[in-house]
Amino acid sequence: MDWLGALGELRAAHEPGVLVTLVSVRGHAPRAAGAKMVVGAHAVWDTIGGGNLEETAVERSRAMIESGASVPELFSLTLSDKAPAEYGVQCCGGEVTILMEPVRTVPSVAVFGMGHVGLELAIILSRHDLDLTLVDSRADLLDEERLAQVKAGLARVRVRHEPVPEAVFPSLAAGTYALILTHDHAEDLALCESALAQDDLAYIGLIGSSSKWARFRKQLTDAGHTQEDLERITTPIGLRDAIRAKDPAAIAVSVAADLLMRFARWS
């Protein structure tokens, strides 16, 4: 796989990486300026020339990944038998400058329930660079015309019509933020059960009142879930102390603002 395909793979898997580019070459070097490779936590795709040059870039890239670096870095390397070389001598005689750009992972959000609040939330989230999965058991709420504004945004949108919405969970990317806000409390409860069975979700949010959650807590506890399990579910969702309005658009703003703050802490 070439570097361009690797970028797509990392993004789809929500895994960090570094795009490495030879931005300038003076004298002789294994590859010309413009050569690229991608470094992931456990793999490397394409090449900038091998040897000490490449291994040094890989080592530095993985240090960036480990530290969560978000700012590109430049460094220069001399290809000479007199230059320090931890991974073998390259005596081409040139000097290269290398640009290392972190490949930012983007959030993945799944919205279960495309009623009034779900639609308003999807419209807001679609304006952001993220992967957005929209799930509903009702096909008419996923109509192309109804979702046209969502699909016109920046987000990469997947629409899932599922008579059993909880079946979607195993296909979600690790680290997904799941929002449960369907029209049916029984469906919400089934989704909570399935969400708790996934140990790699970043967030589980449930819309509803304190009385709804009291009933859910009892039912989930009776089903064998622990207090630690239940603490994984956030309810009510949104900025509860800042936005108290109950119309769908206001609730969506509140929930989206809370998510954006969570994304910032996550990144």
Image (cartoon, rainbow, N blue to C red):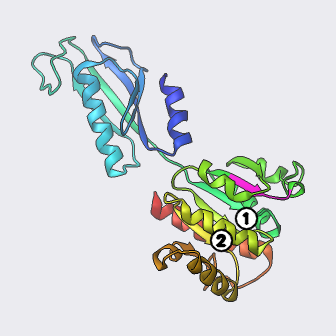
* Left or right: residue 76 compared with residue 236: left
**Residue 170 percent across, percent down from the top left:** 60, 51
* Left or right: residue 62 compared with residue 154: left
Query: Dot 2 corresponds to which residue?
Result: 255
How many labels were placed on the picture?
A: 2
Say above or below: 248 vs 48. below
- Mark 1 / mark 2, whichever is N-terminal: 1
Q: Amino acid at mark 1?
A: Leu
The residue shown at (77%, 48%) is: 151
The residue shown at (68%, 67%) is: 190
- Asked if residue 236 is among those painted magenta in the image, a careful observer would answer no
The residue shown at (53%, 34%) is: 9
Q: Which residues are magenta?
A: 133-138
The residue shown at (69%, 89%) is: 211
Query: In this rendering, does residue 127 appear at all?
Result: no
Dots 1 and 2: beta carbons under 8 Å? yes
Q: Residue furthest left?
A: 82
* Left or right: residue 186 compared with residue 214: right
Q: Return the mark for residue 121.
A: 1
Res 235 → quadrant: bottom right
Res 255 → quadrant: bottom right
Measured Cα–Cα span from mark 1 to mark 2: 7 Å
Neighbour tally class for label 2: few under 14, some 14-19, many 20 plus, Cα within 10 Å: many
**Residue 145 percent across, percent down from the top left:** 90, 50
Q: Amino acid at mark 2?
A: Val
